[in-house]
Amino acid sequence: MSSEPIERRVSYLGDRLKASRCQSCGKEYFEVRDYCNNCGRKSYGKMDSIDLFYDKGKLELCTFVNEPTNKFMKLSSYVYGIVSFHDGKIRVPARLTDQLICDGDDVDLASLEGREVIPRFRRRYTVGKNDVVPTISLAFTLADEYYPHQEYTVVQPNKESELPGIVGYGAYASRFRIKEGSLERAVPFIDEDAVTASVEAGKLALIHSGLDSSWVGKVYVGSESNPYAVKPIASKVAQVLKLGEEDGDVQGVDAVDTEFACKAATSMFKDAASLVSYSRSGIKYAMVIGADNSQAAPRGCAGGELDTYVGFGGAAFIFGKHDVIAEVEGWYSCTSDTPDFWRRDGEQYPMHGGRFTGDPAYFKHMRKAACKLMERSNLKAADLNYFVPHQPNPQFPVRIAKELGFKDEQYLPALQINKFGNTYSGCSLVGLAAVLDIAKPDERILVVSYGSGAGSDAYLLRTTSQLLDKRKRQKINVKFQAENPFIEYVDYTTYRRLKLGM
Amino acid sequence: MQNRPAIVAVGRTKFGEHYGKEPEKLIEEAWLAASNEYNIERKDLEACYMSDCFLPITNKLGLEEGFLSELTELHVPMEVTRSFSAALMTACHAIQAGVYNTVLVGGIEKMTDRWDKIRDDLMLLDDPWSYYAGGTPESNHELMLRAYIKKHNITGENLDKLNMALAEITVKNHANATKNKYAQFQRKITIDQVLSARKTAHKPLGLYDFAPISDGASALILTSDSVAKKMTKQPVSVLGIGSATDYLNYPKREDLSHFVAAEFAMKTASQMSKVTPSDLQVIEVYDQSTVMEMVSLEDLGFCEPGTAWKSIHGCQNCYDIGGKQLYVNTDGGLKADGNPLGATGGAQIYEIYRQLHGEAGERQVNIGGGSPHNGCVLEFEGFGTKAYVTILGVQKDE
């Protein structure tokens, strides 16, 4: 049994890496402090709150751990050391993550010392099934590898649009992949889960949007792999990303998790767009995140067919009315009670309706939503630049795209299933992110997601010139992660082990 | 010094795995051994100071004072500290203040009863934030070694010599332990064993560079000089005792390459006792790792910072400090004698006591044809978070 108060205090400080700096002498502390020991009484109340969440550090010293303490046993071996920030003003203990060490001979400790590292928000260690899931950002990755350092610079919003739309976005997939045939799928590192992916996506979206995180008034997280049956991912996202006005240790933001299989996040696009358009809501920006450590039973077990396609990752979209990069021109959603895919409470893996996940489920709803929205908007397939379908496997999206009359160049840029696998709630969102990464201003994008159970959300988006201005801020885009030279491929057994997590 | 504290009897158990023994049996054994020395009865005791680092965690005993009260059938004041040296220091203060004449100082630990969780416990005691980041009880020692090498810019051939010196520390300690019937390990090891364990671990330090977990107990009887003289011809006086504290979180400390607390504790103890490192040729240091033994030689003032490995390298059973012999951890140290946290300091005091009395048998150190006059003990709590230095001397007429 873990202690809830201790957990809260450790992650409150450790998730964000909160620190303090003395206004007079500049001394820094890795903790929240009211006064400086150098300056004594006169510094009381004159300490600046800083944090290292978006910072980069330097790995000063390191050693190899191959006999971890009990709670780190599932990591089996890793590099552990001391990271310094701000030229050594702050030093923290650190574990290097995203490293699969098969043979300790491969670890060259001396070559790691002195390298730049980035704090990453991860699970801390293994706890009991009934315990609070502990997290921490004292896990680091090398800055010159898969995930480079990006500055988070706040830009004052300028132009207000008539229509609400996307003002920033970020897609995140882990460094590891499993490759079977032409299909590559993202595999989480063992300390990653839907919560850490949500935070990563949200962090990238904030960097891309240039928004002050305190301006975000609502956050929705759609996922079907929340490690908790009850306890939102959104609360963790809000706390770690400091969404909304910070007041003491509480964030002035509304945070909620949504669930509707793979369309849990896309469903909230319209809610976010509406909320920021309603002047009396007082909310200027709303963040929607879809992320999953997509679950599947092992091959050969009931429901194991899903194991061929499941991936890991997600994306976050911030909606607002200022400096919009893609306006939301219209939407249409449809629903029917069609049980084509489900997971009963308490069960680890989902089940599905086999051949009936196609025509009476995916195709029926996708077709309905796409056609209705195009009909209402008086648009034909040829009038659109991009089509972003939900992509549970490599075949379904191609079939629906062709059926709706889209050409290869309209839908292929959105097809990321072959790179990251089916990221469930994050799936259509990653596809949309890939399109926004390459679209030109004044282009129309049709996004149609699908959630089993069943329903579809269709959105008509129109890009603006702001798209190009903001693109420069995001180095870690979809292509960067899909074609990254630091991707590491794992075998089936490792993939299952990593996916199971800590 | 008024009411200078003096040790009149010491006792200890064998260190190691006491699978079949209750913790109370161990402390009883140590206390009986000490009381037998000068026929001290339990009713002579006016107070008890006991140390255990985490007996309530490992053995769920309840209040240790109550358990000690049951054991001794005494109702005198009793206090518990986390290290033997801390208990001794508190007892010394009471004797000096004239509150008591005769007190029992004891220490116990029963770590192997919780062998499956002990490394997590140890790391959480050492430094919780390092634990949260994935640190192990060994990793801070390895990081300190890296910091030491970097700070003093030790490279190439010198680095090889340093690594060899660390291995020699362990070999020496194991050899010493074979002459100590109470020691946990009774076998010699070779340099090759130490080096190949490091290779297996893919780390700068391996299995043989670290002290084990142990069960054990130790005890001593403390009085004042004037009382001691009536009891024994040769009491061992506590000439000086000092302690100092450092940050819990190792990465936060200003200098990662040594233990500043040991330096400060030595200064205090040295000032109090008027004994300097040059007066000392027999010392017990807290070698939880070979790095700790090396670095401690510098922190206690025997070697200049960054040079201890030179004094160690090539030596057999004693180190060469500027042409003078320094005997370190003649009982085998924590590495080979064992390290039952709360009792460890008691075993260190025990060794110095025996050496000063000339009763150390095969281990006996001879300085200028006789047993040494002074000795020194360094004990840590945590990873250098607290340091205690105790300087002992055989009674001389004043």
Image (cartoon, coloured by chain):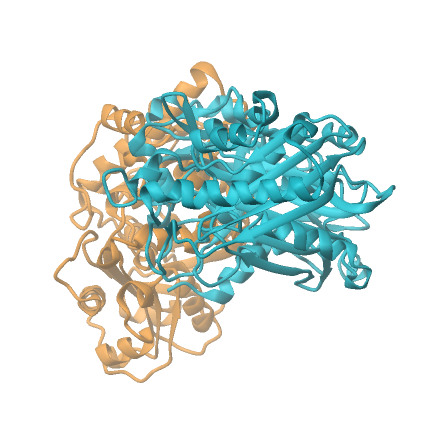
Chain colours: A cyan, B orange
Give the number of marks.
0
Residue A345 in sight from this viewpoint: yes
| Residue A420 versus residue B390 in the image, above or below | above
Locate residue A158: give its quadrant: top right
Position of B72 with respect to A14 (left or right) is: left
Q: Which quarter of the rendering shows the N terminus of chain A?
A: bottom left
- Residue extending farthest bottom: B75
- The residue lying at 31 percent from left, 28 percent from top is B198
Viewer-nearest residue: B345 or B383: B383
Locate residue A243: give its quadrant: bottom right
Viewer-nearest residue: A242 or B247: A242
Position of A477 with respect to B71 (left or right) is: right
Residue B328 in sight from this viewpoint: no
- The residue lying at 50 percent from left, 21 percent from top is A111
| Residue B335 versus residue B269 in the image, above or below | above
Q: Looking at the picture, how far across and down is residue B298, in whole percent?
A: 49, 37
Q: Looking at the picture, how far across and down is residue A44, in whole percent?
A: 77, 62
Q: Looking at the picture, how far across and down is residue A17, in whole percent?
A: 61, 48
Position of A260 with respect to A125 (left or right) is: right
Q: Looking at the picture, how far across and down is residue A180, in whole percent?
A: 35, 24
Viewer-nearest residue: A129 or B43: A129
- Residue extending farthest top: B157
Position of A322 with respect to A252 (left or right) is: right
- Residue extending farthest left: B20
Viewer-nearest residue: B307 or A195: A195
| Residue A256 versus residue A422 in the image, above or below | below
